[in-house]
Amino acid sequence: MDAEILDKMPPADVDAERQIIGSIFLLPDVIDDVSLVVSKADFYDARSGIMFELLQQMHNDQRRIDVKLFIAAAKKAGVWEKIPAELDASHVAECVQSVQTAAHAKYYAELVRDAAIKRELKHVGTMIVQAGQDERVEATDAMNRSEQMVLEIRDRRGAMTSNSVDVGTILGDAMETLDKRASGQIKPGLETTFPGLDELIGFRGSELIILAARPSMGKTALALNIAAGVAGYYQNPVMMFSLEMNSASVGERLLSSGAEIDGSRMRSGNLSLDDRRRLVEYCADLSKAKLTIDDSFRMTVQDIAAVCRRHKRRHGLSLVIVDYLQLIQAENPRDQREQQVSRISSRLKGVARELDVPVLCLCQLNRQVESAKDNRPRLSHLRESGAIEQDADVVAFVHRPEYFMSDPKEKLEARGKAEIYVEKNRNGRTGMVPLLWHDRIVTFSSALPENYEHSFDAYNESAEV
């Protein structure tokens, strides 16, 4: 049965293709509507495809279109000689005479598009069958590649669709959303257990949020704190990709910070009865959290997107966390590293938009931070690609002044203090959120002493201005 399906003629609607060409000759302006639905590659009849492309070019150049002018343009462009001989004046005339009105051009275009999609699906199906029979291909690789090929068809087709909406509709939707926020029906953004970050960053759907720092600054710890708060305290589903640590290490970090037990005692196993009691109690609470960890070592953005799609279908999804960007595998290892990172950041933004959830992606900073005057991270310190800053909606930095201080007195004064700088915020203000860093249990908290909180008033006021 499978062989019979694959051996059948590819799906096509040659008559509808001719109707499109004829409609354009009758009313050239319909090409603007048709071009949003089909392209030259969608035509099964090569002659109609070549005609459509030339008609598009003539229309874009604001040239008049009729049969005689079209033939002259085709000969001048060298198209007339490169195509099959049966494309002559009689064939052009046949296309024109095949339609009575141009009113249905878009409908014909949809028929042609649907047939083209089915041809693409048939081609992909053949490749999937071949992969399924190839013993050299791992089953997981074959499955991921198959899903990617199908999704690529959808992505290409989605790119041709116009999302134009009149401003009245947009403003009406915006006012409705504002009313719902004011009445408490919807939240302005995802809530974490860090009110300062919630207010400044927002954690809104479809946003790519970059959290960057040098190694040992605590970016993974902060990401785990956020994940535990969102999935545990607020019971919103979170998907976390840990590309650096395995799931066992992530579990230990979560238990150490949540149960407030020294990490060194956790690693040595030297735990008191009180430690064990707190571990059992916190473990029981956290096990109810809607948190899923994927510690797959080699993952591309396509792999991440596929896992997230399945998770959203089955369990829902409120937040995606990726630790960290530079460990995501490039699709083409032969590309320059800057191009690879640029493509990765762009596609992570695409994942956020597609799933309509915030994507929190951790990122490494280059060594220039350590030679900066105040060691404070800035946008120029993002490692390997300026495209990260361009694609991100929010860029925040984790900074602990104590780490860079050599004077014992200054180091003591700065001990336990942390600063989260929001240097880019596409939909809000920038500024700084002070936190406390608990080195013993590798975690952050927002329970700040009053004097420390006030010390940042001047910075936040200047940031607002």
Image (tube, helix red, strand yellow):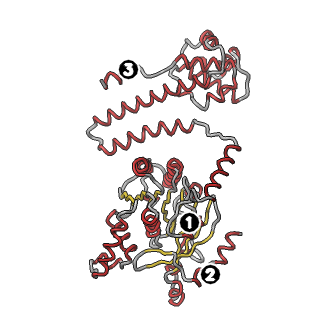
Residue that badge 1 annotates: 198
Q: Is residue 339 visible?
A: no
Q: Is residue 462 above or below residue 288?
A: below
Residue 148 x, y percent position in the rendering = 42, 42
Residue 6 x, y percent position in the rendering = 35, 24
Choose the circle earlier in sequence order: 3 or 2: 3
Choose the circle earlier in sequence order: 1 or 3: 3
Q: Are marks 3 and 2 in contact (CB under 8 Å)?
A: no
- Residue farthest top in this picture: 90
Decide which of 407, 294 is in the foreground and name it.
294
Q: Are marks 1 and 3 in contact (CB under 8 Å)?
A: no
Residue 442 x, y percent position in the rendering = 42, 75
The span from disc 3 to disc 2 (Cα, nearest Å) is: 75 Å
* Secondary element at tag 2: helix
Query: What is the quadrant of the C terminus in the image?
Result: bottom right
Residue 369 x, y percent position in the rendering = 54, 71
Q: Is residue 69 above or below residue 268?
A: above
The span from disc 1 to disc 3 (Cα, nearest Å) is: 57 Å
Q: Nearer the viewer, mark 1 or mark 3?
A: 1
- Residue farthest bottom in this picture: 409
Label placed on residue 8 = 3
Which amino acid type is shown beneath numbered disc 1?
A: Asp
Which amino acid type is shown beneath numbered disc 2?
A: His
Q: Is residue 54 visible?
A: yes
Residue that badge 2 annotates: 454
Query: What is the quadrant of the N terminus in the image?
Result: top left
Q: Nearer the viewer, mark 3 or mark 2?
A: 2
Q: Is residue 236 above or below residue 94?
A: below
* Secondary element at tag 3: loop
Decide which of 105, 48 is in the foreground and name it.
105
